[in-house]
Image (tube, rainbow, N blue to C red):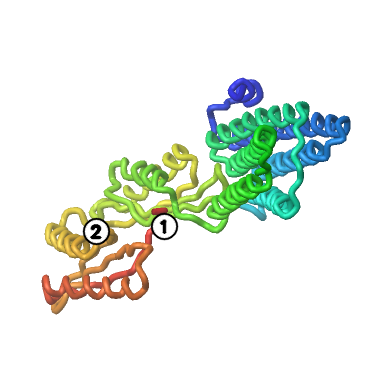
Amino acid sequence: MTELLVHKFIKDYDNTEDTQVRTSYGILTSVVGIFCNVLLFAVKFSIGLLLHSLAVTADAFNNLSDAASSIISFIGVKMASKPADEEHPFGHGRIEYIAALIVSFLIMEVGLTFLKSSVGKVMHPEELAFEWIPFLILVLSIGVKLWLGAFNRKLGNRIDSKVMLAAAADSMGDVLTTSATIISILICRFTSVNVDAYAGIIVSAIVMWAGFSIAKDTLEPLIGQGAPRELYQKISEAVEAYDGIVGTHDLIVHNYGPSHSMASIHAEVPNNVDIEVSHEIIDRVEREVSKQLNITLVIHMDPVETQDKKVLEVKAKVARVIKALDPKLKFHDFRMVSGEEHTNLIFDLVIPREYSKENAERILQQVIALMQEVDSRYQCVITMDKSYVAE
């Protein structure tokens, strides 16, 4: 059913990096969510009125609130697809994260409401009555919500959409709450033991935790997170694959929505190559890698020594010293400037994120001292640096 809907309503559905295709996926999942939840509301509300069942009627309005979540998702996806304008030169993609955040709060609200109701039943127990029609409606509701959750999760993973994954979690939360109700009814019917309230407390905690987890995952790109290791490798390997590029470092990725990222990276080029030749290579890499990875890439060119044996020998000594102190340490932009009385060794030292200020300073002094033991003329001019790649 999922693939049938995708093939029927989404043109060029395989091109998930395209903004319009992503928007079509978001609209499809939102419309399907609205349709399913409104349908469940209409069926449950009608039967609730016929049977005078408050439980079925209350569950109907829960489905109506789920339809509201789908509407929020729909609005968020549509607004996120708006092109860049004068006030928002990087587009509106982050609105999708905000929509997912709103849905996550709705999930937590459902969990909190269910918790209050469960605690109230612990304090004031109510007898559970078994009726076939409401029971079968609950079972049907679970089937619909299971499919809807799987539908949102599958397509959300396909296009890396936070708001669709939040909608999937919302559906699965409903599955948990309704399943707890069904299990409690069956236990009470066959054992006369009423565990409804206690099951409700456990399920409500699970639902609230799911909402909190979604909020946390959604806030990370809004606050600013390090580049994923996989993306770091893709960009670095793509840039270093070109002739004339001998290495890369200082990669920074800024996320402006699931389909729009901007990255900057330093590319090392041989210092004995004409600068115009290297600049032409850098321009070509920017254009081609940007198109290949669907990002906006800016490259800073760093000339490095590749021929002078003396410089390379000293660089290798620095590498051994740094590795001996901590294998996690890295360095780049190495230059050696020789004078009559001393030789400056100039480089950037990349400090692991977990280092305190005191530990970083201690490592710095150790590197300086050890290199002077190698040769008393060596004066290290070190710039402390940090990685912007997620661990």
Left or right position of 274 against 7:
left
Q: Which residue reaches farthest bottom?
A: 341
Residue 304 seen in render:
yes
237, above or below 359, in the image: above
- Quadrant assignment, res 348: bottom left
**Residue identifier under label 2:** 327
Please provide percent x and percent y for residue 315: 18, 61
Which class describes the residues within 10 Å of circle 2: few (<14), some (14-19), or many (20+)?
few
Quadrant location, the C terminus: bottom left
Q: Residue at x 64, y 31 (%)?
A: 148
Could you tell which of marks 1 and 2 lies nearer the N-terminus? 2
151, above or below 221, in the image: above
Which class describes the residues within 10 Å of circle 1: few (<14), some (14-19), or many (20+)?
some
Q: Are the residues flagged by discs 1 and 2 in contact, CB closer than 8 Å? A: no
Q: Residue at x 29, y 57 (%)?
A: 303
Q: Residue at x 26, y 71 (%)?
A: 363
Amino acid type at image mark 1: Tyr
- Quadrant assignment, res 55: top right
Amino acid type at image mark 2: Pro
Asked which secondary structure carries label 1, the reply is loop
Closer to the camera, 378 or 217? 217
Closer to the camera, 52 or 234? 52
- Quadrant assignment, res 87: bottom right
Q: Which numbered marker is on residue 388?
A: 1
